[in-house]
Image (cartoon, rainbow, N blue to C red):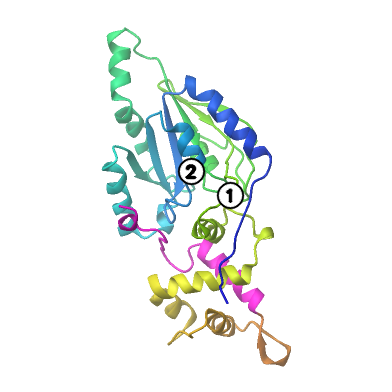
Amino acid sequence: MSNTQNIQWFPGHMAKTKRLISEQLKIIDAVAEIVDARIPVSSRNPDLTGIISGKPQIILLNKCDMADSSATAKWIEYYKNKGIIAIPVDCKSGKGINGFKEAVKTTLADKLKVYREKGMVGKPLRVMAVGIPNVGKSSFINKIAGGSRAKVENRPGVTRGNQWFTVDKELELLDTPGVLWPKFDDVTVGEHLAFTGAVTDRIIDTELLAMRLIEILTVKYPEVLKERFKITEFCDLSYDTLCLIGKSRGMMIKGGEVDTERAANMLLEEFRNCKLGRITLERAEDYA
């Protein structure tokens, strides 16, 4: 039996968000897209990419402290080869945030030169911040704008409307609500978003999701599971490995069976909180 799920998620307000973003582009100099460093491809909205393609871009690889550092370095090089500056950041702690203003100036160097030639020195640059729900965009704005000015909550879909923030006299930032897209054509994209919590667990079979995560980790990071849950060998079926994981934590129910639902929720929570270690599920070399 396949452990894959066809995960779909498209609240009505997200259609409105796309329209709001399109309308604001004419007054924006550049777009800063916040993505999850663990899944840099799946955490980019392809619909949004099409809308903002005519503007200079900066990529912020958020949650870099949760991602495999060697994989992140390759993603930075990947975007560099495409003429896009990507910077690793951790929006909760503020790590790497100081590099954002310089990245904006470098990206918009030609526009700044025109400003100088026209005697418009001091005219602030305007950057739109975009990103899918729960990727850390509000935390980024709170850090870069100084103080908790944008509502932060570990739940998809908190920000509802566009908001302007003055970073300093040289930079203004426009926040936009997180937006997903109507259909995940690639099942893997839906899975990866669900692993990280970008899609609400209310529409997901968490046991199937955990079994799928086990299948991936046993290939890409086998030692992580072995060390964390004291497993010596993996089972042929991911369900049986999930049972081993649950048993290692004493998650038993009557009759000596493992509470697999509880084990699945625990595994997903530990992945999302980086308790399994620094893991990147998508590698730049696979998209070259």
* Residue 285 included in the magenta stretch of the image: yes
Per the image, the residue denoted by label 1 is 183
Q: Residue at x 55, y 24 (%)?
A: 23
Decide: few, some or many residues near mark 1? Use Cα within 10 Å; few <14, some 14-19, many ≥20.
few
**Identity, as a three-letter code, of the amino acid under mark 2:** Pro
**Percent x, y of residue 185:** 53, 53
Residue 231: image tag: none
| Relative depth, front residue between 89 and 45 | 45
Q: Position of residue 32 (x, y in %)?
A: 43, 35
Residue 221 at least partly seen? no
Q: Is residue 225 above or below residue 112?
A: below
Q: Is residue 267 visible?
A: yes
- 134 relative position to 233: left or right: right
**In terms of image quadrants, where is residue 171?**
top left
For the magenta stretch, what is the residue range? 260-288
Q: Outermost residue, bottom direction?
A: 255
**What amino acid type should be assigned to the residue bearing mark 1?**
Lys
Q: Secondary structure at mark 1?
A: loop
For label 2, the residue is 46
Marks 1 and 2, the one that precedes in the sequence: 2
Q: Position of residue 205 (x, y in %)?
A: 65, 67
Q: Quadrant of residue 269?
A: bottom right
Answer above or below: position of 168 versus 58. above
Q: Residue furthest right?
A: 254
